[in-house]
Amino acid sequence: AQTVTQSQPEMSVQEAETVTLSCTYDTSESNYYLFWYKQPPSRQMILVIRQEAYKQQNATENRFSVNFQKAAKSFSLKISDSQLGDTAMYFCAFGLPDSWGKLQFGAGTQVVVTP
Amino acid sequence: DTAVSQTPKYLVTQMGNDKSIKCEQNLGHDTMYWYKQDSKKFLKIMFSYNNKELIINETVPNRFSPKSPDKAHLNLHINSLELGDSAVYFCASSPRGSGSSYNEQFFGPGTRLTVL
């Protein structure tokens, strides 16, 4: 069974600064997908970024980028130029192809952006 | 043009009651899911349906019964509610569950269930 670990329960960052959230996972599979989801106070789950394990290039979406280290089974999220609207719970998730979309989520990291 | 909608958004009820949560998606997706988010924000899949067929059934008490009348709808009925059922329940959908290039899921706004 796959496990996803987020070791930082909460992180605080000032506006315009950069914050990095860590995520590690455990799997014996070689092909899989990794995701970061954001859950703001509104409760809505929003996909931030995704990474296919067979792609070596790190995914980026505007101010969000990942550092995917397959050998280390690490998938960190970097938020650059943090904005107040980035305040949210961030979840790392793992999925396998042909698994009917079953995602394994980490426990989440609460990010607080301060003025 | 809501993609995945759930009703109700809030539900407060007494122990022992039976309640239902409804979910609808207008994205044309084949696969739908129910997740439970507990008080510590931990998110865990409960069920998955593909074209009205039950695909994933995690270790969930049989007081929870999902029903999919068509592929755009997935409802969750809970019998004999217990205090521990208090949580936020999320519905989600994805284009195809199996063999997809990736498992991107689109979530509903969640239903906060409080059992007193």
Image (cartoon, coloured by chain):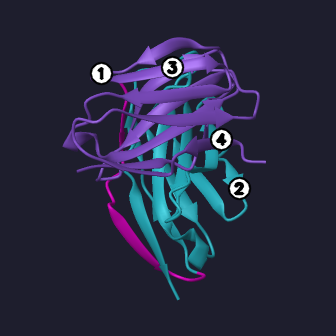
Chain colours: A cyan, B purple
Q: Residue at x 42, y 31 (%)?
A: B45
The disc label shown at residue B4, or none: 4
**Chain under numbered label 1:** B
- Tell me the CA gap for discs 2 and 4: 23 Å
The amino acid on which the numbered mark 4 sits, given as a three-letter code, is: Val
Disc 1 to disc 4: CB gap under 8 Å: no
Closest to the camera, between mark 3 and mark 2, is: 3
Q: In the image, what residue occupies the spot 46% across and 22% down? A: B66
Q: Are marks 2 and 4 in contact (CB under 8 Å)?
A: no
From the image, state whether disc 4 or disc 3 is nearer to you.
Answer: 3
> Disc 4 sits on a residue from what chain?
B
Magenta segment, which residues?
A1-16
For label 3, the residue is B67
- Of badges 1 and 3, the one in the foreground is 3
Query: Are discs 1 and 3 located on one and the same chain?
Result: yes
Residue B31 position in % (x across, y down): 62, 23
User: Given this view, does label 2 or label 4 mark the residue nearer the observer?
Assistant: 4
Report which residue position mark 1 lands on. Answer: B59
